[in-house]
Image: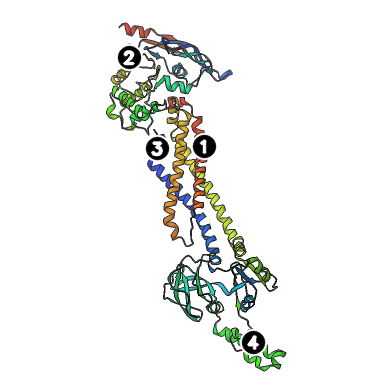
Amino acid sequence: MDNEFAIETEGLTKIYGSGNTEVVAMRAATVNVCRGEVIALLGPSGSGKSTFLTAVGLINTPTAGRIRIGGELVVDGPKAHMDLRAFRRRHIGFVFQKSNLIPFLSAIENVQIALEINNWSKAASRKRAMSLLDYLGVADRANHSPSTLSGGQQQRVAVARALANQPSIILADEPTAALDSHLGRQVMELFGKLAHENGTGVVVVTHDQRSLDVFDSVYEMEDGMIRRSEIGILSQTK
Amino acid sequence: MNLAIKDIRHNLGRFALTTVGVGMLLMIVMGMGGIYRGIIEDATLLIDEVGADLWIVQRNTRGPFAEVSRIPANLVHRALAVPGVQTAREFVYHTIQRERDGKPIRIAVVGLSWPTDKGETLPFVAGRPLALNHFEMIADRRLGLPLGERIRLGKEKYTVVGITENMISSSGDGLAFFTVADALDIQFDIPGEAVRLEREARFARGSLSDYGRKQPALTDSAYLLPSQIPALGPRQISAVMISIVPGTTQRAVASIFAGWSDVSVYTVGEQRDLLLRGPVEKVRRQIGLFRVLLTIIAAIIMALILYTLTLDKLHDIALLKLIGAPNRKILGMILQQALLLGVAGYGIAYVVGMRIFPRFPRRVILTKDDLLQLAVIVLVISVLSSVLGIWKALRVEPNEALSG
């Protein structure tokens, strides 16, 4: 994956239902995210942000359009060009609004599981998981159950899990919604740091316009249409 | 990382309770099989223990264990004259119910052909065989009669001189061994008034018959004991047990007895088959059906439990799919939980059963084959019961992790 783009979408369209019940959730969305670039995706509820994110995350195949990840054609219309789950496992990290940790696993095990399903040995995965938790400042909570962690700690563990396999892209769906503004900003800055250090392409769906200066680009969605926003440019020039 | 174990640890209380429930259910299935084996064992125990090669019984009956059989005691002497017969012994068998310390006690009375058979071959745990022709008995431990106890049966008191173990009748009653004479006395114990009335009736019948008028001395015999006047009341026994001369075939000797028109003859194998096909067959089918039903119920309960456990984890399963976990990882988790539930349930069934079954009123015999068979059944139903959960898990879409 030597392509300069982490993500390339071309004319992505998603239509739910048919005939009178037809709903166009996403219209010809074309976005390029470079390696090491962090983009924000803004827009009101129902504008198609999550549809775009799930399409790029390969969990919701588009009706039309193409998705390339790291230059590799992954989806062409509704047709997958490979085993999408295996591809997700290796190349995509997810962070959600809620931390979405598995309740019956400890913090470190939640990170380990992402590595073990990618054929890491138990010892190696534990070492890597611990170093990630350490990097994110929650190593002291490694053996705690998710229910005993604060919201911010849970989200950091979720970020550690998303980073575990050194993915080409990270997709985050309102990752700071459950956090206070200070912690929210910390998480956003963390994405920026990770992208710039590791060359990962990061797409963050957010409503939080206070941290837009962290992003390299800002896109807006409305009625399924995506366009580059002026907001980001303004915030960056402040 | 074993997700099945991790999830079980997280829901340990619920899983433990469920396992105990499944274990109890499997224990009943196990116990049912053990009860069936016990019935078979008890039913054939006496036939196997007394060591007879052939059984001579009342014509067209299936022997003393299946129905009432009456043959004259002197048949023993006729049988002894048959070539190939080494010994012929009288056999008396019937069940009585009496009261002891205000509680009912059921005794399967067996008459031994004393002194030929004093019960030496019985499985003694205490005491000795019958030494006297009268008033001694060997009792099975199940009857609860201690050594030296004297118990009144009919007009006489009998002393327990020996205790056996696991000598049970097909109906689950403990066996007690007496001499044939005592066994008959117990069986035909008649109240004094009934004896007096019968003697008077016998005298009246004799006096009124031409034979009695011509031979007045005959009517004097009417006042004797029935056993002393064979012409009027021959002594009856249940069967004659034959042991054949070594080297002689059972079939050859049996064919001679088969030619006698007043009796039927069975080999030990035939006697056992008759018993198992008769009284035991219905019990076998009943218990078999119960076992099948209980096994199905256990499978349904396990399936529902595993399905519920899977439903509780649907969000986590969707998340696992989202981060790319292969199906085998997810299905493995459900299948392993099913197998753990089955194996742990089976273990509980075995451990608890081994403590509880000896307290059952009837013997519960767990054979290795039956235990192995049940283990295989448990494995199969564990796998089958996980199918519903697996089906549900396979239908979960990864984007469900994004909701809620």
Label 2: which secondary element: helix
Mark drawn on residue B202: 4
Q: CA gap, disc 3 to disc 2?
A: 37 Å
Mark drawn on residue A197: 2
Mark 4 on the same chain as mark 3: yes
- Residue A148, located in which quarter of the rendered image? top left
Which amino acid type is marked by label 4? Arg
Mark drawn on residue B388: 1
Q: Residues within 10 Å of mark 2 (few under 14, many from 20)?
A: few
Mark 1 on the same chain as mark 4: yes
Q: In which quarter of the image is the C terminus of chain B?
A: top left
Q: CA gap, disc 3 to disc 1?
A: 20 Å
- The image position of residue B56, as x and y in percent, is 63, 71
Label 3: chain?
B
Foreground of the two, B59 or B130? B130
Q: CA gap, disc 2 to disc 1?
A: 46 Å
Given the current orientation, which residue lies at the most extreme right position? B210
- The image position of residue B167, as x and y in percent, is 49, 66
Depicted B350 relative to depicted A107: above or below: below
Label 1: which secondary element: helix
Between discs 4 and 3, the one toward the N terminus: 3
Q: CA gap, disc 1 to disc 4?
A: 78 Å
In front: mark 3 or mark 1? 3
Residue topped by disc 3: B5
Q: How crowded is mark 4: few (under 14 residues within 10 Å), some or many (20 or more)?
A: some
Which amino acid type is marked by label 3? Ile
Label 4: which secondary element: helix
Which amino acid type is marked by label 2? Glu
Between discs 3 and 1, the one toward the N terminus: 3
Label 4: chain?
B
